[in-house]
Image (cartoon, rainbow, N blue to C red):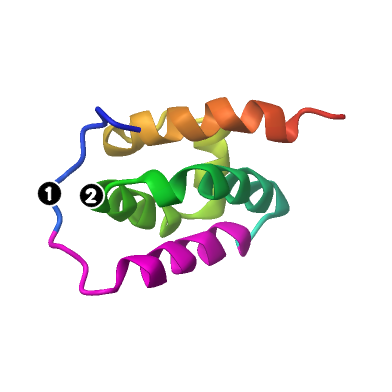
């Protein structure tokens, strides 16, 4: 995700490992199953390698409504600019997650 435009954010006082685990859990426990699958896969591949600023952006994204997130990832609705690159990366990874086996 390097190269993403990331808004400045105050550093988190939360220890890095605790923050990563919290984001992993929030990625798995969503309101709709499709987002559970998509975000759990993304988080397992990317969270450990993210910078603190990227984690902050991902944390904010996880605070958004699941139906909006799904519409952004699926391309049904335009993505807010601040999330555009992150959602594009999630959507690229989701192609393999949501494809029937």
The residue at which mark 1 appears reads as 8
Magenta stretch mostly in which secondary structure? helix
Work out whether mark 1 precedes mark 2 in sequence or the reverse, and give the earlier one: 1
For the N terminus, the quadrant is top left
Magenta segment range?
10-29
Q: Residue 27: percent from the left, percent from the top?
A: 55, 57
Task: Say above or below: 35 vs 89.
Answer: below
Q: Residue 30: percent from the left, percent from the top?
A: 60, 60
User: For the residue labelled by badge 2, is the local secondary structure a helix, a strand or a loop?
Assistant: helix
Q: Is residue 88 magenta?
A: no
The residue at which mark 2 appears reads as 53
Task: Say above or below: 22 vs 4.
Answer: below
Kindly indicate whether the residue at mark 2 contacts the one at mark 1 (C-beta within 8 angstroms): yes
Q: Is residue 75 visible?
A: no
Q: Residue at x 48, y 67 (%)?
A: 21
Classify residue 32 as left or right of residue 45: right
- Mark 2 packing: few (<14 Cα in 10 Å), some, or many (20+)? some
Task: Say above or below: 21 vs 71.
Answer: below
Q: Residue 87: percent from the left, percent from the top?
A: 44, 34
């Amino acid at each position: 995700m390097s190269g993403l435009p990331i808004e400045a954010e105050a550093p988190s006082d939360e220890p890095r490992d605790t923050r990563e685990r919290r984001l992993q859990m929030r990625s798995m426990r969503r309101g709709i199953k499709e987002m559970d699958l998509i975000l759990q896969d993304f988080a397992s591949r990317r969270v450990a390698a993210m910078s603190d600023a990227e984690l902050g952006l991902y944390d904010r994204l996880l605070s958004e409504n699941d139906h909006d997130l799904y519409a952004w990832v699926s391309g049904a609705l335009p993505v807010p600019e601040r999330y555009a690159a992150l959602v594009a990366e999630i959507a690229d990874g989701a192609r393999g997650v949501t494809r029937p086996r």
